[in-house]
Every structure is written in structure tokens, then in C-alpha cells.
Image: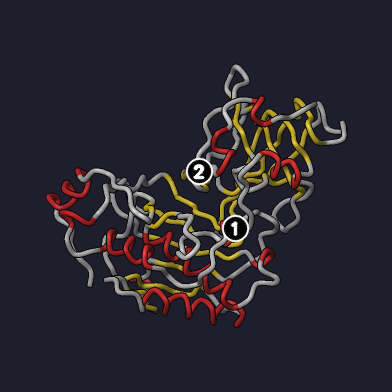
Amino acid sequence: MKRIITVAALLGILSIPSHSFAYNVLGNKFSDNDFYYKLEGTFPSKYSGPLQAAVDSWNDTNTPISFIKSGIDELIEVHFEVPASYGNTSWDGMNAVSGPSGGYYTYASIIINTDLLNYANFDYIKGLYGHEMGHVMGLDHVYDKTQIMCTTANGRKVYVPGSDDIDGINYLYGQSYSNVNPSVTLTDADSVRYSGHLVKNYETADELKKDADLVLEIEATDSSSLEYKNIVFTLINAKVKKEFKAGKKFKDKEIKILETGGYYEGKNYLFEDNEVLKEGDKTIVFLKKYEGPIADDAYVILGAYQGKFNLDKNGNIKESKKLDGRLSEINNMNDLQLDE
């Protein structure tokens, strides 16, 4: 059932210190336990069956949450978009969440990229939907391979919520606000949070170099954002300053880079809290040729954000968010071990 949050209860939530558990939370959530959802069109059977199985897997957990299919638009909170082609974007599934300024989430959508799921079976797609539903409710990634909030890129072995996933949902949506809810980061109405399920997780610079078509130092000169099938992308024009893996063909020339997210119609769409490149930004990028319907003759960053290292005015690498393994320890150019 839906609940009314009093001011006193909200203040109690905000005052609770952070904790360390076997689950991670994103920092915000919906205010109620009933998630009314809608399929935004006709789904191919390859996706409709796994989606229903994912819904059932969450509804069968010992938690207070329920996913309820509805045809009443005023009730809909979670929108499952029809699976579509987005090209080799590095993610095969993602979600978007937003809400009013100073409030909880009120809107979520879940999107599937069919181009990276050509060989995916029923269980894989079921797990992908279940994973994205966990994000929508407020769960973040974990590394335990027996939990749905681990990514397949990190070796997830299950397709249904695990015990820690369930504990996380009870933490977020349990009955006692005084001792089981996290400190809440209230929504900014001017931003939309994207969380993505990467098809490959990079942990070292060597892994990035091995897969990259190009490794460059670039400076962004301008950019333009667009919405394609309910997702915002940004196409960046950039001048090549240095080549590290490019065959000496690109220096002083311009290339195009396609990123997921960006500023569009007054809102900032952030993929895993990552700002897209903007004019004047200097960056080391590990790139792959983009193949897909959104842009021609463009490149994408490996791992969406994992292959991007922003530079400060002195040429030092800025701190990056959500990097794994030895990538998280990279502090300067020497750590990347790049040779011109």
C-alpha cells in the first residue's frame, strides 16, 4: 500500500548515518512500495517472457514491494520501453529515474538495447530486467556474483534476486523508518539519473588499450544533444591533440564521439553520474568505432565512461567516478602507461 511520509519522518531519514552492508544503495527511492508499470508498446516474445519472469521474481521475494501492471496512466511509475536498436553503446540495458526537486523518484523507465543481445537467452534477459528493476527501486551495483545487482560483466551467476538484494529492498522499503531506511539524497528536478548494465567491465588500462581502436588526447570543441527512442545522447566534436593508438592519422584533425546522456531541454541526463564532454574539456579517451543508427562516422568510449580520463588545466588526470580495479587507482598519465 502507498504511504504518506510526514515531515518528521523525512527528517528522520535524512539524519540517519551511512552504513556498510552487503548491498549498496543509490541514494534515493520511490516513496511507496507499489510500483505500477506499463509496457510502452508491443514486445517481441524474446523480451516479453523474460520481462514477466523478472517481475514475478521480484514479487515473489519476502519484501513489501509489488510490481503491478496497470492501464491507468495516472498511476504509472515504471515504464518498460519497447526494446530497440541503439548500436554498440557499451550497455545492453539501462534505466532512467527522476522526480520533483526535493522529492523522491516519481518516474522510471527501463530500456533494452537489442543490438547487444543478439545471442542472449531467456535467463540472461530475465536477469537483465531484474537487475534494472533493482536500480529503479534504489539499489546500486555489488560484486557478489550470487546477487542480481552484480552485473554479468562482473560474473553474475544468477537471474533472480538474492538474499542481499532482498535485504537491500527491505532496508529501503521496510516498515520502520527509524532504523532501516538510508540517508536520502532528494531528487533534483533538473537532472535525470541513468544507470547502465555494461556488457564488459574494464579494470586495467591494458584491457582498455587492447580493445580500443583509438587512444587519443582530445579537446572538445562543441557538442549537440538529441533524444533517440527515449534516451538522450550527445555528439561531441573534438580536436585530436595527441595520438597513442591511432596509426598517426588523426593528430590535429577532428573526430566525433557519441556519449549516452547530456543536457537536453533544460535537464542534465547523467549516465552513472558521468558528465558528458563539453567545449574546452581535455581528455584521454579509449575509443571504439560506433556502429548503429544514431550517428555516422563517430566513436564511442569503451565502457561508456571507463575509458575516459579527464585532464585538469595542468594536464593531470582528474578523479573519475565508479571505476573498478586498478583503473580506480589511476592518478596521473604515467599510470596509464601510454606512449605517443
Q: What residue type is disc 1 on?
A: Ala
- Residue annotated with mark 2: 322
| Residue sitting nearer the eye, 191 or 11 | 11
Q: Is residue 99 above or below residue 63?
A: above
Of badges 2 and 1, nearer the viewer stands 1
Quadrant in which the C terminus is drawn: top right
Q: Is residue 78 above or below residue 277?
A: below
Rendered residue at 26%/47% (across/down): 183
- Residue annotated with mark 1: 153
| Residue sitting nearer the eye, 166 or 90 | 166
Q: What residue type is disc 2 on?
A: Lys
- The CA span between labels 2 and 1 is 14 Å
Mark 2: which secondary structure? Answer: loop
Q: Are marks 2 and 1 in contact (CB under 8 Å)?
A: no
Rendered residue at 49%/59% (across/down): 150
Q: Position of residue 79 (x, y in %)?
A: 45, 68
Q: Quadrant of residue 44?
A: bottom right
Q: Quadrant of residue 49?
A: bottom right
Rendered residue at 73%/29% (across/down): 338
Give the left or right position of residue 223, taking residue 67 as reference. right
The residue sitting at the left extreme is 8
Quadrant in which the N terminus is drawn: bottom left
> Would you say residue 269 is visible in this rendering?
no
Q: Position of residue 38 (x, y in %)?
A: 44, 74
Q: Residues within 10 Å of mark 1 (few under 14, many from 20)?
A: few
For marks 2 and 1, the one nearer the N-term is 1
Mark 1: which secondary structure? Answer: helix
Q: Quadrant of residue 337?
A: top right
Which disc is residue 67 wearing?
A: none
